Amino acid sequence: MADALVEWLCRTEVEWDEFDAHNMPVPFGFAEFLVERADRAGFSFRLDQEETAAVLPLPGESDLVTFFDMHRGAEGDKGHFMDPSVATFFERVARSFMQIGWLRLNFLEVGDRALASTFGFELDGALYLYNSAYDIDARRLSPGLLLVAHQIEDAIESGLHTFDFMRGPERYKYQLGAQAVPLNNLRILREGL
């Protein structure tokens, strides 16, 4: 949208001196996109705070800690996966994607106890399941499978068109109805230029 607006400002025959947009949230709002595109097009700009908005950040860090703990409690490779550098990566992704409304950090809970968790993204009518974990003590109940089944049901009820389990041939994905889609490696070579 910022690209289209700046392109219109560059090409329009309408005489204008100033495009004035009020109450644009900063940071992580449309204002940054518009400033960057306007600057790239050679326009000067001013960004001045005129008001504030009251925003309540919802709990997320404690949920991430629970997700990390489930990973670290897992057996085998999964239990060693969530080292400090991987946890930092997940924290950065969560913080960035939460602010733009894409993050989906879901839990299956019984009382105050989390039994399973999924870390994914919702974008353009699709839900992407990026990672999951469950409480190893509850494995006989298949809490991870139950949580994903509920998420699929919720995605259908919400009108989403795709539930993408992403990369990996895990059996549960196909038990829940997924179809295999090839993933390709594309290399662009300089030869022949």
Image: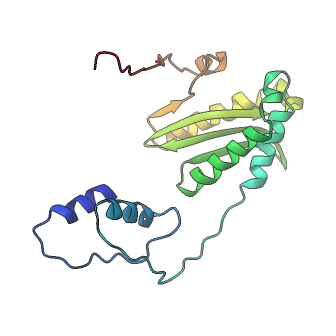
Report if residue 1 is visible in the image: no
Q: Which residue is found at the position 35% from the left and 64% from the top? A: 39
Instruction: Give the color scheme: rainbow, by chain, secondary structure or one colour.
Output: rainbow
Q: Where is residue 176 in the image (x, y as percent from the top left)?
A: 60, 22
Q: Where is residue 163 in the image (x, y as percent from the top left)?
A: 52, 32
Q: Tell me: 21 left or right of 59.
A: left
Report if residue 8 is visible in the image: yes
Q: Quadrant of residue 186?
A: top left
Q: Tell me: 133 left or right of 25.
A: right
Q: Which residue is found at the position 66% from the left and 65% from the top? A: 57
Q: In this view, does 76 lie above or below 63?
A: above
Q: Which residue is found at the position 80% from the left and 34% from the top? A: 71
Q: Which residue is found at the position 75% from the left and 47% from the top? A: 64
Q: Nearer the viewer, residue 36 or 181?
A: 36
Q: Where is residue 9 in the image (x, y as percent from the top left)?
A: 21, 65
Q: Tell me: 83 left or right of 106.
A: right
